């Protein structure tokens, strides 16, 4: 069974500072994918970044980067130069090797990030 | 650019009533999913579909039914609503199992 653990229920960061949101995962599969989603107070789920288990380089998307440490089974999200609009709930999710013809995302419980002036 | 559209956005039901949530996507995605989000529990998969005419159970399928008669639409039905089904429901779609899932804005459902 797959499991995602996000140990930080809430985080504060000052505007323009960098922040790291932690995510650890547990799977016995060799092939898997890791995703981060942002959920603002308005409720929608916004895809941020993806890392495949065989990708050799850490994924980056603009101000978002994923610090992937396979041996530690961690996939931390780093947001550089935080902005007030980054205040939201952030979810880490994992897609394991498809079983049959489909797979599902397993989500963590989320980290609420608050960016302050 | 519509993406994934869910209707309705809000609904209040009485215990025992039935209703259908509609999800429509205009990206020609094969895969579609229904999740529920409860406080402190993240999202959990209810049912999913790998293509038109196919459906399969996820983690928490009890009390729900789904249908995918057209590729662009994925319907979630509650035959006899229960208070435990009070939640926020998200629909998502993706090109393949390996691609990111794109989510709708959610439906907030309250059952009294």
Image: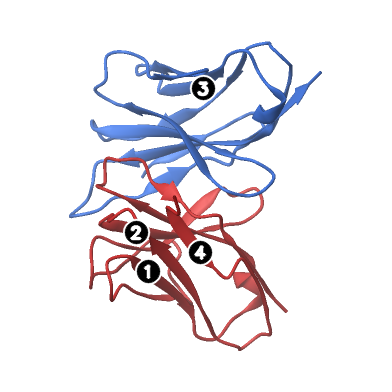
Chain colours: A blue, B red
Picture layout, residue B99 above or below residue A104 = above
Dot 2 falls on a residue whose secondary structure is strand
Question: Given the image, what chain letter belongs to the residue carrying mark 3?
Answer: A
Q: CA distance from mark 1 to mark 4?
A: 10 Å
Q: CA distance from mark 2 to mark 4?
A: 12 Å
Q: Which residue has dot 2 on it?
A: B32
The mark closer to the camera, 2 or 4, is 4
- Residue B49 percent across, percent down from the top left: 29, 63
Question: Given the image, what chain letter belongs to the residue carrying mark 2?
Answer: B
Q: CA distance from mark 4 to mark 3?
A: 29 Å
Q: Determine which of the numbered discs, if any, sits on residue A84 in the image.
A: none
Residues behind callouts 1 and 3 on a single chain: no
| Closer to the camera in the image, B57 or B9 | B9
- Is label 1 in contact with label 2 (beta carbons under 8 Å)? yes
Dot 4 falls on a residue whose secondary structure is strand
- Is label 4 in contact with label 3 (beta carbons under 8 Å)? no
Q: Which residue has dot 3 on it?
A: A77
Mark 1 neighbour density, 10 Å: few (under 14) some (14–19) many (20 or more): many
Q: Determine which of the numbered discs, if any, sits on residue B6 in the image.
A: 4
Picture layout, residue A17 above or below residue B20 = above
């Amino acid at each position: 069974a797959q499991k995602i653990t996000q140990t930080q229920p809430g985080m504060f960061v000052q505007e323009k500072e960098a922040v790291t949101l932690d995510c650890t995962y547990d799977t016995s599969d060799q092939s898997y994918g890791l995703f981060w989603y942002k959920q603002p107070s308005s409720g929608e789920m916004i895809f941020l970044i993806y890392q495949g288990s065989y990708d050799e380089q850490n994924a980056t998307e603009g101000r978002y980067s994923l610090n992937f440490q396979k041996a530690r089974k961690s996939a931390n999200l780093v947001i550089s130069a935080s902005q007030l609009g980054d205040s939201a709930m952030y979810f880490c999710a994992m897609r394991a090797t498809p079983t049959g013809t489909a797979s599902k995302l397993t989500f963590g419980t989320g980290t609420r990030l608050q960016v302050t002036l | 650019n519509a993406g994934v559209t869910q209707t309705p956005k809000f609904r209040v039901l009485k215990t025992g009533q039935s209703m259908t949530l509609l999800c429509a996507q205009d990206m020609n995605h094969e895969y579609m999913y229904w999740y529920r989000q409860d406080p402190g529990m993240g999202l959990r998969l209810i049912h999913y579909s790998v293509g038109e005419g196919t459906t399969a159970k996820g983690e928490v399928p009890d009390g729900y039914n789904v249908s995918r008669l057209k590729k662009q639409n994925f319907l979630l039905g509650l035959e006899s609503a229960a208070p435990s089904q009070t939640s926020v429901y998200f629909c998502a779609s993706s090109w393949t199992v390996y691609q990111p899932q794109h989510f709708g804005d959610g439906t907030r459902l309250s059952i009294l």
